[in-house]
């Protein structure tokens, strides 16, 4: 239908405060030009030149409400276009308002119009009543149009021609007088001046409920991707957990996907990603840096966490796309453990002397020395780190053989536990103790000490004579002579020789 010529009524756009709050408010986010069933895109001619409704969709970061607004760009002044809302019971209308921004608005211009049509007969708008009002723009900041209390002059369209009807009647009163029928349609259209405009915050109040349409940008999703491990070359999207060793370099990647709105298609788009991190002991995320991504490549971020850290990326949005954020990635960071063994060859019963440093260099962290046995790793000593992360342990080697040993550091203070390299210690059987040489005593008979005395035997000369007599005559001159006893009771005395 061509734009109708009606008596000129100007409604000047003035900055107004927000309408009084209703008992209940329903917020409807309109993603770009993906209109819900209660909204539609409408257009019409500005004069006798036919307008086919072709416009260029505009998006703007910064709206009357929310983060964005949408708008239209016109190649000429032959047509106007905008958004139309449908209401089932216009007799209960309490609010109909709309905010617009005209970047190049000029005083005295009349770039748009508001129209309302009501079908009280329920013909599905084959015939209907309608009213129009021109909307005059005279500044280039956001301003609200409130039409619920405006008194319109009404016309009737029977499908062929128009005729005058009620005058100076509000929308709600007209619907009350004539009936709701198929409901009402409200349209805000601009463009007859050929200039860009943006729209936002369309409010339709019916009864105790107000529906607020918030025109936003094209929805997007931001993804954080990374390699599944330090040595992997496969990028994983939305990985939630990763384990690194303190100081290891790793790469995070960010990009965003467009869900489209019917004008802008779906797919990857160009933009900027920002990296945020929340480290151990921190209560909030900190901005770490930004990097650009394209439809062909990610935004890349290098990280080298020392302690457990949570990362996320977001895209702040563009004029076209809504901001969005990724899922979080929790990076668990293992400690590094160095180990030194003072002597790798010892005797059984001696101590294996461990020493080393953990990184990060925290004091008060539990460490333990372990020995590998047939049943697994067995703890043989425990201790805690000193200042600078230093430690020392000295367990005794209770058996001989090849000992596989290591040091294990416990988790805590923002790090995951870890273990050192495995070392080998040779434990030998100690040699037998040397036996002390004891000399067997040799008995030496001492020389007898002569004891002086007078000899009781014969003198040496007499011994010689005795021996000669024995040799030659068998006589022992030294033997005592036998004593003859009395033969018959008498004694005989012999004569000396």
Image (tube, rainbow, N blue to C red):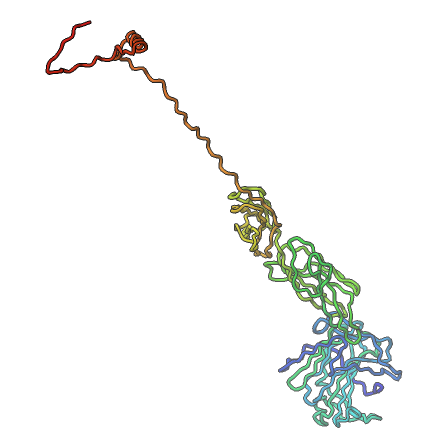
Say if 257 sits above or below 350 in the image: below
Dividing the picture into quadrants, the one containing residue 312 is: bottom right
Given residues 220 and 197, the one toward you in this image is 220
Say if 50 sits above or below 237 in the image: below
Task: Report x, y in % for residue 32.
Answer: 76, 75
Say if 152 sits above or below 192 in the image: below
Task: Report x, y in % for residue 164.
Answer: 80, 93
Given residues 183 and 489, the one toward you in this image is 489
Image quadrant holding the C terminus, namely top left
Task: Report x, y in % for residue 12.
Answer: 76, 79
Dividing the picture into quadrants, the one containing residue 136 is: bottom right
Residue 171 falls left or right of residue 481 = right
Q: Is residue 171 visible?
A: yes
Name the outermost residue toward the front. 488
Count of numbered marks? 0
Given residues 190 and 339, the one toward you in this image is 339
Dividing the picture into quadrants, the one containing residue 309 is: bottom right
Given residues 370 and 154, the one toward you in this image is 370
Image quadrant holding the N terminus, namely bottom right
Say if 173 sits above or below 381 in the image: below
Q: Is residue 14 visible?
A: no
Task: Report x, y in % for residue 261.
Answer: 77, 75
Name the residue rendered at 86%, 81% in the picture: 52
Residue 126 falls left or right of residue 360 = right
């Amino acid at each position: 239908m061509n734009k109708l010529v009606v008596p000129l009524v100007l409604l000047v756009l003035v900055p107004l405060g927000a309408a009084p709050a209703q008992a209940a408010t329903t917020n409807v986010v309109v993603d770009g030009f993906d209109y819900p069933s209660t909204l539609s895109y409408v257009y019409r001619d500005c004069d006798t030149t036919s307008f086919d409704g072709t416009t260029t969709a505009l998006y703007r970061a910064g709206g009357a409400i929310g983060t964005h607004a949408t708008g239209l760009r016109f190649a000429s002044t032959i047509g106007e276009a905008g958004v139309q809302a449908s209401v089932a019971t216009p007799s209960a209308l309490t609010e109909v308002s709309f905010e617009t921004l005209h970047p190049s608005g000029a005083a005295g211009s009349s770039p748009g119009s508001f129209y309302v049509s009501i079908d009280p007969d329920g013909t599905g708008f084959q015939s209907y009543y309608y009213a129009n009002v021109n909307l005059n723009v005279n500044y280039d900041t956001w301003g609200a149009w409130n039409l619920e209390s405006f008194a319109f002059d009404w016309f009737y369209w029977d499908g062929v021609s128009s005729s005058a009807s009620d005058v100076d009647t509000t929308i709600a009163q007209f619907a009350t007088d004539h009936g709701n029928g198929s409901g009402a349609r409200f349209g805000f259209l601009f463009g007859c001046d050929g200039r860009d405009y943006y729209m936002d915050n369309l409010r339709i109040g019916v009864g105790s409920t107000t529906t607020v349409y918030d025109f936003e940008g094209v929805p997007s999703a931001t993804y954080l991707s990374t390699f599944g491990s330090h040595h992997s070359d496969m990028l994983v999207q939305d990985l939630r957990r990763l384990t690194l060793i303190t100081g290891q370099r790793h790469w995070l990647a960010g990009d965003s996907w467009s869900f489209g709105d019917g004008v802008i298609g779906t797919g990857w788009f160009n933009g900027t990603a920002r990296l945020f991190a929340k480290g151990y002991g921190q209560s909030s995320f900190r901005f770490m840096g930004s990097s650009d991504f394209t439809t062909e490549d990610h935004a890349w971020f290098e990280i080298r966490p020392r302690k457990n850290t949570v990362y996320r990326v977001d895209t702040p949005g563009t004029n076209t796309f809504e901001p969005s954020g990724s899922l979080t990635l929790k990076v668990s960071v293992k400690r590094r453990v160095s180990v030194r063994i003072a002597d790798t060859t010892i005797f059984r019963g001696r101590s294996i002397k461990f020493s080393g440093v953990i990184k990060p260099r925290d004091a008060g962290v539990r460490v333990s020395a372990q020995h590998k046995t047939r049943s697994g790793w067995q703890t043989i000593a425990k201790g805690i780190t000193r200042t600078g992360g230093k430690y020392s342990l000295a367990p005794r080697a209770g058996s001989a053989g090849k000992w596989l040993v290591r040091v294990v550091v416990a988790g805590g203070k923002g790090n995951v536990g870890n273990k050192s390299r495995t070392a080998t210690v040779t434990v030998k059987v100690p040699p037998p103790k040397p036996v002390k040489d004891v000399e067997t005593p040799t008995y030496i008979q001492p020389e007898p000490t002569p004891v002086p005395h007078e000899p009781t035997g014969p003198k040496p000369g007499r011994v010689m004579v005795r021996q000669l007599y024995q040799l030659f005559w068998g006589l022992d001159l030294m033997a005592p002579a036998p004593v003859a006893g009395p033969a018959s009771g008498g004694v005989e005395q012999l004569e000396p020789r």
